[in-house]
């Protein structure tokens, strides 16, 4: 469905320069990818490249094997987009948004759009500028789901949504990929939702894609180990993502780690996505980068 090859992009302003560095990954049809990383890691910049809002300096983007920029109009028809910034006319009401922006898409279904607005309890006659942040996200979601898109690019769509709306979005994402013809790339900081629905995990740091792997493959390669400090202290430093020493117990996430399961004085288990994120952020840039390199070398 989506293939990215050696994508690079430099973004500059008066204060700093940020780079997306040699991003490559493939998301097959029928799968959900959770895109993770700290704020400023490059998630939003990558998604804006994938939507055509940013032109990469070099590299290639393919949607259903078609080069994105050689078939931009057709490819944009296939994209369902929710961004962290709103691009609708603020003075339009939701009916006007549907009619005006829907006319830009070949397969826009106005009745379906209104049905999604109703699902999210949105007043279609209300002006966009008078909506809360969460409501504006719901309008974007409603529109993205209403023009027969095949690839959904959601940038922090849960930001501002209440618990019930988050559950509805998780359900929608699962239903979207159920026919095996659509895919979802979902940037989110709500890791428990990614644990439930993500098939792949992309983990970004400082403009680099450290990992892009099936979730189970990624988590299976690491273990959380808890026990007395003197026992964890003997683990080779190059295998430790991060170690946290408390007064009574020490915990660490390590690459591999199955061999420690036989020690009944230690608690050893596979990390969830929330723990993976926590330990990699705590591990720091250089340590995380080295662990990622070792991981790739082992699996290449």
Image (cartoon, rainbow, N blue to C red):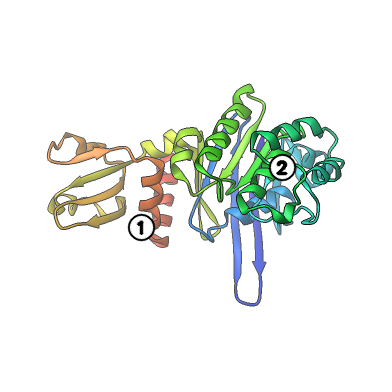
Q: Are marks 1 and 2 in contact (CB under 8 Å)?
A: no
Q: Position of residue 78 (x, y in %)?
A: 75, 36
Element assignment for label 1? helix
State the residue position of label 1.
283
Q: Secondary structure beneath disc 2?
A: loop
What residue is shown with label 2? 123
Residue appearing at x 39%, y 45% in the figure: 274
In this rendering, the count of numbered labels is: 2
Q: Is residue 220 above or below residue 252?
A: above
Residue 273 pos. (x, y %): 41, 42
- In the image, taking residue 228 as reference, residue 213 lies left or right, namely right
Give the residue at x 66% y 73%: 13
Report the side of 260 relative to 166 (left or right): left
**From this viewpoint, which residue is outermost toward the top?**
179
| 157 w.r.t. 120: above or below | below
> Looking at this view, is 134 or 287 the one in front?
134
Q: Position of residue 236 (x, y in %)?
A: 24, 52
Q: Nearer the viewer, residue 69 or 86?
A: 86
Q: CA distance from mark 1 to mark 2?
A: 46 Å
Q: Is residue 117 above or below residue 129?
A: above
Residue at 60% from the left image edge and 32% from the top image edge: 172
Q: Position of residue 300 (x, y in %)?
A: 46, 40
Quadrant of the image containing the N terminus: top right
Give whichever of 271, 188 is nearer the camera: 188
If you read the primary sequence from the N terminus, does the residue marked by circle 1 or circle 2 appear first? 2
């Amino acid at each position: 469905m989506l293939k990215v090859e050696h994508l690079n992009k430099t973004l500059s302003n008066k204060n700093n320069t940020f780079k997306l560095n040699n991003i490559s990954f493939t998301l097959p049809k029928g799968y959900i990818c959770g895109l993770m990383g700290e704020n400023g890691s490059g998630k939003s910049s990558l998604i804006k490249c994938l939507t055509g809002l940013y032109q990469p300096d070099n590299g290639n983007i393919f949607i259903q094997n078609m080069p994105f920029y050689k078939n931009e109009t057709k490819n944009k028809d296939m994209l369902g987009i929710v961004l962290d910034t709103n691009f609708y006319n603020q003075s339009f009401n939701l009916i006007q948004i549907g009619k005006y922006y829907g006319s830009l898409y070949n397969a826009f279904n106005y009745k379906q759009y209104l049905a999604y607005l109703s699902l999210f309890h949105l007043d279609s006659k209300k002006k966009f500028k008078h909506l809360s942040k969460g409501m504006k996200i719901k309008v974007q979601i409603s529109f993205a789901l209403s023009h027969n898109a095949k690839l959904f690019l959601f940038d922090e769509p849960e930001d501002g949504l209440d618990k019930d709306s988050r559950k509805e979005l998780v359900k929608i994402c699962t239903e979207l990929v159920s026919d095996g013809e659509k895919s979802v790339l979902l940037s989110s900081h709500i890791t428990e939702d990614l644990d439930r629905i993500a098939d792949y995990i992309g983990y970004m740091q400082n403009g680099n894609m450290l990992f892009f792997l099936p979730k189970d493959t990624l988590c299976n390669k690491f273990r959380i180990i808890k026990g007395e400090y003197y026992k964890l202290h003997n683990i080779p430093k190059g295998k430790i993502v991060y170690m946290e020493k408390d007064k009574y117990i020490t915990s660490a996430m390590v690459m591999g780690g199955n061999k420690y399961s036989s020690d009944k004085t230690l608690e050893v288990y596979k990390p969830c996505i929330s723990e993976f994120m926590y330990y990699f952020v705590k591990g720091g840039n250089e340590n995380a980068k080295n662990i990622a390199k070792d991981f790739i070398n082992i699996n290449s």
